[in-house]
């Protein structure tokens, strides 16, 4: 791709290139980005090189047409950030995989939401020696409200972590003693809701009573 004068516009933080090859949105700027997290796996960047500097985060944007007039706003979720990226890429394939529809002509390409209620229009056409690139202006909202930011509690996926009381864990583990229950729960990754055992575990009490009775009949 030959870099023409107009392609310098692509270096703006609010300019996003419609891209069918990228599996995720990619940006070179953290401006207005929140919920930033390091990506656990190195990803292939728009520059082609795998790198482990990649973070991911969310960006609230106002979509504007080529005359700068806002027509919708939305949140881009899980955008990849790396300083190694040359441009902002808007992943068209990601939108298509979520049920958005793509249409277009020589003037613009349009993504339409599954409900037909929202549109994202790539109406800035940048000619290249090979053809053209369709670009859209997504102005970042740099004022992040507290409501947007996930707390650590929300981020941590606790839905798959077995959660139980100490008594429940104790019963699950065959009524072994408290210390062993806590140790085993830790190993199993269980979340214990209370560290207090009820003063009397019925099953244990019954077991002890049986033991006593048994001891009585066994001659010493
Ligand atoms: Zn018990």
Image (tube, rainbow, N blue to C red):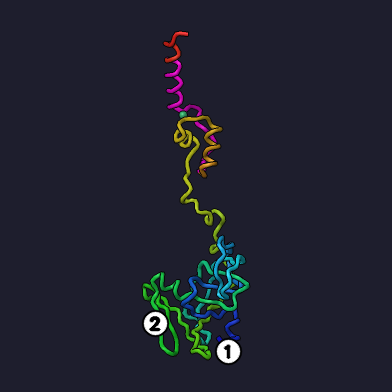
Horizontal and vertical percent position of residue 77:
50, 67
Q: Is disc 2 surrounded by few (<14), some (14 to 19) or many (20+) residues within 10 Å?
A: few
**Residue at the image position 58 percent from the left and 89 percent from the top:** 6
Residue at (54%, 33%) from the top-left corner?
Answer: 180
Up-down: is 194 above or below 23? above
Q: Residue furthest front?
A: 49
> Is residue 49 depicted above or below 9 in this figure?
above
Asked if the residue under mark 1 is in contact with the one under mark 2, i.e. CB atoms within 8 Å, the reply is no
The furthest residue to the top: 219
Secondary element under disc 2, as helix, strand or loop, is: strand
Pointer 2 residue: 103
Q: What x and y, as percent, mark residue 184? A: 52, 38
Q: Is mark 1 within 8 Å of ligand 1?
A: no
In the rendered image, the residue lying farthest to the left is 115
- State the separation of the CA atoms marked 2 and 1: 24 Å
User: Which dot marks residue 219?
Assistant: none
On the image, the x and y values in percent for residue 69 come to: 51, 84
> Is residue 102 or residue 54 the one in the foreground?
54
Viewport quadrant of the N terminus: bottom right
Say which residue appears at 47% left-offset and 34% top-offset. Answer: 173
Q: How many marks can you see?
A: 2
Residue 6's disc is: 1
Ligand 1 contact, mark 2 (Cβ < 8 Å): no
Earlier in the chain: of badge 2 and badge 1, it is 1
Above or below: residue 64 compared with residue 194: below
Residues rendered magenta in the picture: 190-213
Q: Is residue 18 magenta?
A: no
Say which element carries label 1. Answer: helix
Q: Is residue 201 magenta?
A: yes
Q: Which residue occupies 53% across, 54% down?
A: 156
x and y, in percent, of residue 19 in the image: 49, 78
């Amino acid at each position: 791709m030959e870099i023409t004068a107009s392609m310098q516009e692509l270096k703006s933080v609010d300019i996003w290139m419609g891209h069918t090859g990228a599996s995720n949105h990619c940006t070179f700027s953290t401006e207005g980005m929140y919920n930033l997290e390091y990506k656990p796996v190195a990803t292939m960047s728009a520059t082609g090189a795998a790198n482990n500097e990649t973070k991911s985060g969310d960006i609230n944007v106002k979509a504007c047409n080529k005359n700068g007039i806002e027509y919708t706003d939305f949140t881009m979720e899980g955008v990849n950030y790396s300083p190694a990226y040359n441009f902002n890429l808007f992943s068209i394939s990601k939108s298509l995989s979520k049920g958005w529809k793509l249409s277009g002509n020589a003037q613009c390409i349009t993504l339409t939401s599954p409900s037909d209620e929202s549109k994202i229009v790539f109406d800035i056409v940048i000619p290249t020696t090979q053809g053209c690139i369709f670009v859209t202006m997504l102005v970042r909202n740099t004022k992040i409200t507290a409501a947007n930011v996930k707390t650590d509690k929300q981020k941590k996926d606790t839905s798959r972590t077995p959660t139980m009381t100490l008594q429940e864990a104790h019963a699950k583990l065959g009524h072994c003693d408290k210390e062993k229950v806590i140790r085993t729960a830790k190993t199993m990754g269980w979340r214990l809701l209370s560290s207090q055992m009820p003063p009397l575990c019925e099953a244990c009490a019954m077991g002890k009573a049986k033991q006593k009775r048994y001891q009585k009949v066994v001659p010493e």
